[in-house]
Image (cartoon, grey):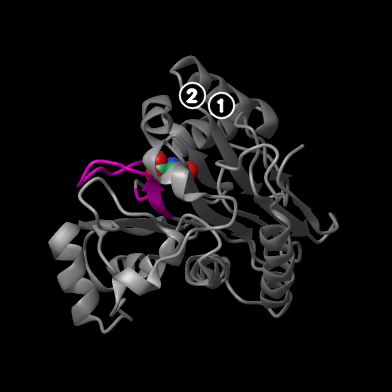
């Protein structure tokens, strides 16, 4: 258990737009967007909103804008249609919700929160997720062919390859509570039905009373490294935050993948390391000024 004291005034927030940026490409547009969204979310935290509301709001915006490989920026799988994965976890209650391989909803993270709040389950997938989302009245994509768009920094050639991306948010609110949320269109050209780390509570998303984490990168390797929970358990047993994350990133690398992580702790520490080429990211806290970057 971490011995870090809990503050009831500090807040901290980190966002990511995925660990898939390609060196040499221009990410000015996403950096500007992340800057504005981070300031917007900081206002929510300063107003006393819960970490859960803030991470849902952040990921909703990241899904809707179409600038990242999530929501509107998702690419079709090998069967020619988009399948969306998302998850959210409330560190205060340890409740969690997720959707996997959900087709054509505007904001999968909102459906994930609804799974958490309106069902006894943690995850719904495929047709069942779709029926649930429809029953809850969430916005559907009515014209998929014209809705989805290439995200910033992705070319039509990349769609044949292994390009990937994700969005995520982690927050500590002024009440001392932590939450995390993650959403993705997955890896381009993925097999029909393929589900990565993003909707999995544990590998892709984790929040408890000491730490909130959202992962991005090659999902299969993140899952096999243990992902976010492997970091959380190391951190909770006394390993320093940076070391706890680095051990997980090294495991991902050893298994043949690459990844990035955003984490905030109950002590308002923020970490955003990666071993991919870059990671679109932004953060702010009571003590740290706004920081936005894509590469090092
Ligand atoms: N982790 C995501 C997935 O494997 C992709 C990414 O984060 O870039 O679906």
Residue at the bottom extreme of this rendering: 137
The label on residue 249 is 1
Q: Secondary structure at mark 2?
A: helix
- Where residue 268 appears, as percent x and y from the top left, is 72, 52
Residue at the (49%, 15%) spot, across then down = 254
Q: Nearer the viewer, residue 240 or 149?
A: 149
Label 2 Cα crowd, 10 Å radius (few <14 / some 14-19 / many 20+):
many
Residue at the (84%, 54%) spot, across then down = 288
Residue at the (45%, 58%) spot, across then down = 70
Residue at the front extreme of this rendering: 157
Label 1 Cα crowd, 10 Å radius (few <14 / some 14-19 / many 20+):
many
Residue at the top extreme of this rendering: 254
- Where residue 167 appears, as percent x and y from the top left, is 52, 55
The range drawn in magenta is 184-199
Answer whether labels 1 and 2 touch (C-beta < 8 Å).
Answer: yes
- Where residue 146 appears, as percent x and y from the top left, is 36, 73
Residue 12 sits in which quadrant? bottom right
Q: Nearer the viewer, residue 209 or 162?
A: 162
Which residue is under mark 2? 252
Q: Is residue 260 left or right of residue 166?
A: right
Q: Secondary structure at mark 1?
A: helix
Q: Is residue 206 magenta?
A: no
Q: Nearer the viewer, residue 14 or 163?
A: 163
- Cα separation between marks 1 and 2: 5 Å
Q: Compared with residue 172, is residue 242 higher up or lower down, i.e. above or below? A: above
């Amino acid at each position: 258990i971490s011995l870090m004291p809990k503050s009831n005034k500090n807040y901290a927030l980190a966002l990511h737009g995925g660990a898939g940026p390609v060196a040499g490409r221009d990410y000015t547009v996403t950096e500007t967007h992340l800057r504005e969204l981070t300031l917007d979310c900081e206002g929510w935290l300063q107003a006393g909103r819960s970490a859960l509301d803030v991470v849902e709001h952040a990921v909703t915006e990241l899904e809707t804008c179409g600038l990242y490989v999530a929501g509107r920026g998702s690419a079709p799988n090998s069967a020619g249609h988009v399948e969306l994965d998302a998850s959210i976890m409330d560190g205060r209650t340890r409740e969690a919700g997720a959707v996997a391989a959900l087709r054509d909803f505007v904001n999968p993270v909102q459906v994930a929160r609804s799974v958490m709040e309106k069902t006894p389950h943690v995850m719904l997938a495929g047709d069942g997720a779709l029926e649930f989302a429809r029953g809850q009245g969430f916005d559907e994509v009515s014209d998929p062919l014209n809705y989805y768009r290439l995200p910033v920094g992705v070319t039509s050639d990349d769609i044949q390859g292994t390009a990937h991306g994700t969005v995520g948010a982690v927050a500590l609110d002024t009440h001392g509570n932590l939450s995390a949320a993650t959403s993705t269109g997955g890896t381009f050209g993925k097999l029909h039905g393929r589900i990565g780390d993003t909707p999995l509570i544990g590998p892709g998303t984790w929040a408890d009373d000491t730490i909130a984490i959202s992962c991005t990168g090659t999902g299969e390797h993140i899952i096999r490294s243990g992902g976010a929970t492997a970091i959380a358990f190391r951190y909770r047993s006394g390993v320093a935050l940076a070391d706890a994350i680095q051990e997980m990133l090294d495991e991902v690398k050893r298994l043949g993948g690459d990844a990035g992580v955003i984490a905030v702790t109950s002590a308002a520490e923020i970490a955003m390391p990666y071993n991919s080429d870059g990671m679109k990211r932004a953060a702010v806290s009571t003590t740290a000024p706004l920081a936005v970057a894509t590469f090092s």
